[in-house]
Amino acid sequence: MIDTHIHIDEEAYAADREEVIARQRKAGVEAMIVPGVNAQSIDGILDICHRHKGHCFPALGFHPQDVKEDWQEQWAIIEKAIREYRNELVAIGEIGLDYYWDTTFKEAQREVFQRQLDLAQELDLPIMIHNRDATEDTLKILKLQIADCRFAHPLRGVMHCFNGSKEVAKQILDMGLYLGIGGVLTFKNCKLFETLEVVPLDRIVLETDGPYLAPTPHRGERNESRLMIFVVQRLAEIYGTTPEEIIAQTTKNAKKLFFA
Ligand code: NI
């Protein structure tokens, strides 16, 4: 299994991070991608990924929720680091729009998202997109980006923590993007299984978004990559196949997107 999105650098893992990482390896998690959220997160992520080379892989980016008054200073630091560490990075992320908590910096969020899309295409890196309560703007920006022919490299990436409708899924798939599926799929009342009717298995990657969103029956606990097995089991039911096949296919997808 490959966990394409885990915040292993966060405080929630501070007390036993090394044990947690070792435990995932033992449980058959072959790689973990650690996304950046702001300028402060850069050093910690790179340090962990250097110490666990070949198992933990860094992404760097500017999370929309971290876009505040000081966004220009933050962005200057993040952009510099992305360019400097380009060859170690497997993606730019997480990036996107989040209108859920605070829309004060909506304009700045869109500006920062745009700059990161441009940078991803300039540097030929995939993107990890975060969208919360901003589907319309997110899709609009992505479509314009794809229609823009300034870049030699195509836009590629994943809609992280996807939990949308069939209509939205179709639009994302049409743009050539993947869907990141995590613990939410196992939650009671989650309708994502209906959406998956229009999603081919070769367009799904697994993720935890740890420490958040642990799958049922561990809902509410600190998440770990090995718990993705519960997501795998649910996917196997939905697609009428075996957990082994789900693991094989999602691993292949993640390798194609991030490690090719
Ligand atoms: Ni995240």
Image (spheres, rainbow, N blue to C red):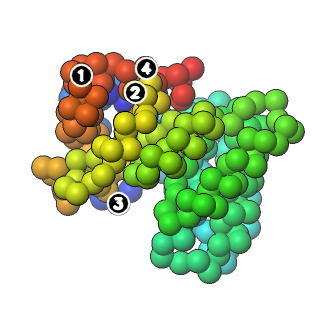
Q: Are marks 1 and 4 in contact (CB under 8 Å)?
A: no
User: According to the image, label 3 marks what residue?
Assistant: 11
Which numbered disc flags the more N-terminal residue, 2 or 4? Answer: 2
Tell me which residue sits at (58%, 77%) in the image. 103
Q: Position of residue 53 (x, y in %)?
A: 45, 29
Q: Residue furthest right?
A: 150
Q: Position of residue 26 (x, y in %)?
A: 21, 27
Q: Are marks 2 and 3 in contact (CB under 8 Å)?
A: no
Q: Tally the numbered discs.
A: 4
Say what secondary structure mark 1 lies in.
Answer: loop
Crowding at dot 4, Cα within 10 Å, few <14 / some 14-19 / many 20+, comes out as: some
User: According to the image, label 4 marks what residue?
Assistant: 252
Q: Is mark 2 within 8 Å of ligand 1?
A: no
Say what secondary structure mark 2 lies in.
Answer: helix
Say what secondary structure mark 3 lies in.
Answer: helix
Which numbered disc flags the more N-terminal residue, 1 or 2? Answer: 2
- Check the image and report above or below for 91 versus 27: below
Crowding at dot 1, Cα within 10 Å, few <14 / some 14-19 / many 20+, comes out as: few
Say what secondary structure mark 4 lies in.
Answer: helix
Tell me which residue sits at (12%, 49%) in the image. 217
- Tell whether 152 sits left or right of 163: right
- C-alpha gap between disc 3 and disc 1: 37 Å
User: According to the image, label 1 marks what residue?
Assistant: 241
